[in-house]
Image: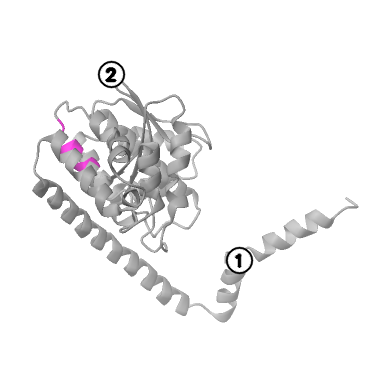
Amino acid sequence: MRNRFIQLIFKISKEEDAFDILEKEVLKLTKKEISQSIIDCGILPEIFTHDSSEEKLWAKFTDILLAASLTFLNIPSEVLRTRGDSADVFGKAKNYSIVADAKTFRLSRTAKNQKDFKVKALDDWRKGNNYALLVSPLIQYPSRRSQIYFQAIDKNVTLLSYTHLNLMLTYNDNKDFKPLWEVGKNLKAKLNSTEQQQAEIYWENIDKSVCKILNINEDALSNIKTLEMQKTKEIGQEGIDFWQNKIKEYKKLSKEEAINRLIASEKIETKIKTIMKAISFDN
């Protein structure tokens, strides 16, 4: 499934209606296929060039998957087309509305910080809606103490992993997820400021809330977490193989080819043209 959408994105990334094509394909998926795709969508393929149209389209792919997941959870949702200063996904349940954001990261990316998660921004983007949700790979969240947990609790922004979402799709049977969206508010009332920064405390409460709503024991959640780790290792090895092949490819380049590629990668000629344009006062 993952490779299928990687190839599709390569094929359509330059098209004006690329998002529409991608959304149409994702919405054809069954709930089971969505749950399978959601488990590893948070890992951005190394094969995509940094800041490329393919990379940006993959980010949209995760948004579409999140919207489809929420819809299967009886929270009809859509990906918003607005640019900047807005959540990516909006959902409307029977008794509440929710805004959501899906995060995807490269495994080769260095340590993430609170700015990468934009918890406060998501709270601002909530505006008049009731709840806010941020979903990211579990391994990308800080594993000890962090301000993102304090912010999530303080602003009642629910942090979830794609593992939790997979579990919710698997065991959902017209469940009411409202208690999950209020975990932060409840923790704020009973934890001190130091405890509110602790990853272990936060995830323990999220895990318990999800399992209670779904009426399952935590063994089921542990099994899905194990599956996510296995998938992450597989995709990680694919990334390692990709970059090792790049090294071999570069070693075969002639000196002139290597220099030209370096110049292109640094965008030196573009920078020169930009400076020339900036100082061409006579034109």
Q: Nearer the viewer, residue 142 or 110?
A: 142
Q: Is residue 61 visible?
A: no
Q: Nearer the viewer, residue 43 or 161?
A: 161
Q: Which residue is mark 2?
A: 94
Image spot of residue 201 (x, y percent): 25, 50
Image spot of residue 74 (x, y percent): 24, 25
Magenta residues, as a range?
165-172
Q: Residue extending furthest top? A: 94
* Residue kind at label 1, given as amino acid type: Glu
Q: Is residue 83 magenta?
A: no
The image's mark for residue 91 is none
Would you call the spot at circle 2 few (<14 residues within 10 Å), some (14-19), or many (20 or more)?
few
* Residue kind at label 2, given as amino acid type: Lys
Image spot of residue 144 (x, y percent): 31, 59
Q: Which residue is mark 1?
A: 266
Image spot of residue 122 (x, y percent): 44, 38
Q: Earlier in the sequence, mark 2 or mark 1?
A: 2
Is 208 located above or below residue 172 in the figure? below
- Element assignment for label 1: loop
Is 27 located above or below residue 264 in the figure? above
Task: Decide whether the magenta segment is chiefly helix, strand or loop.
Answer: helix
Q: Nearer the viewer, mark 2 or mark 1?
A: 2
- Element assignment for label 2: loop
